[in-house]
Amino acid sequence: MKDETIVLSTDSGEQVAFDVLEVTRFQGADYLLVADSSLSGDGECYILKDTSPAGDEQAAYEFVENEAERDYLYQIFTELLSDTDIALEK
């Protein structure tokens, strides 16, 4: 899923674009590692969880805020990206 962009709508209706860096599935849920800038530059990374019901055509993403969950997923994404030129910093 590299080089894909997703656009999320905020509660106020603002459209925000994120570059998808990697995708993984953990404990039955899909997670995205996204960046708020072009893949060619520095940016902030976020982990999003797909909270939509199974079978929905439209995904619903939430930022992972639970620190333990986020730290564990960070380790997974770091391993998945270890053979790329993308460097994650905590």
Image (cartoon, rainbow, N blue to C red):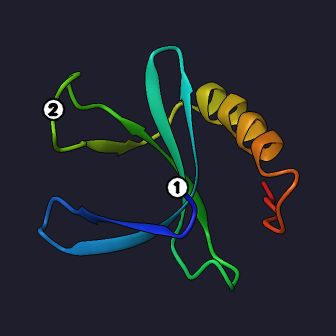
Please identify the residue farthest to the right as the structure is shown.
Answer: 83
Give x and y (percent) for residue 13: 12, 69
Of 44 and 5, nearer the camera is 5
Give x and y (percent) for residue 45: 61, 61
Asked if the residue under mark 2 is in contact with the one under mark 1, i.e. CB atoms within 8 Å, the reply is: no
The residue sitting at 51% across, 73% down in the picture is: 36
Q: Earlier in the sequence, mark 1 or mark 2?
A: 1
In the image, residue 35 above or below residue 61: below
SS label for mark 2? loop
Give x and y (percent) for residue 58: 17, 44
The residue sitting at 81% across, 59% down in the picture is: 89
Q: Marks 1 and 2, Cα distance to the nearest angstrom?
A: 19 Å
Residue 56 badge: 2
Q: Residues within 10 Å of mark 2 (few under 14, many from 20)?
A: few
Give x and y (percent) for residue 38: 57, 82
- The residue type indicated by label 1 comes to Met
Task: Locate the C terminus by quadrant.
Answer: bottom right
Of 16 and 11, nearer the camera is 16
Please identify the residue farthest to the left as the structure is shown.
Answer: 13
In the image, residue 44 above or below residue 46: below
- The residue type indicated by label 2 comes to Asp
The residue sitting at 31% across, 73% down in the picture is: 16
Report the number of numbered marks. Answer: 2
The residue sitting at 57% across, 62% down in the picture is: 2
Using the rendered view, name the quadrant where residue 18 is placed.
Answer: bottom left
Q: Residues within 10 Å of mark 1 (few under 14, many from 20)?
A: few
SS label for mark 1? loop
Of 59 and 74, nearer the camera is 59
Please identify the residue farthest to the top as the structure is shown.
Answer: 27
Residue 1 badge: 1
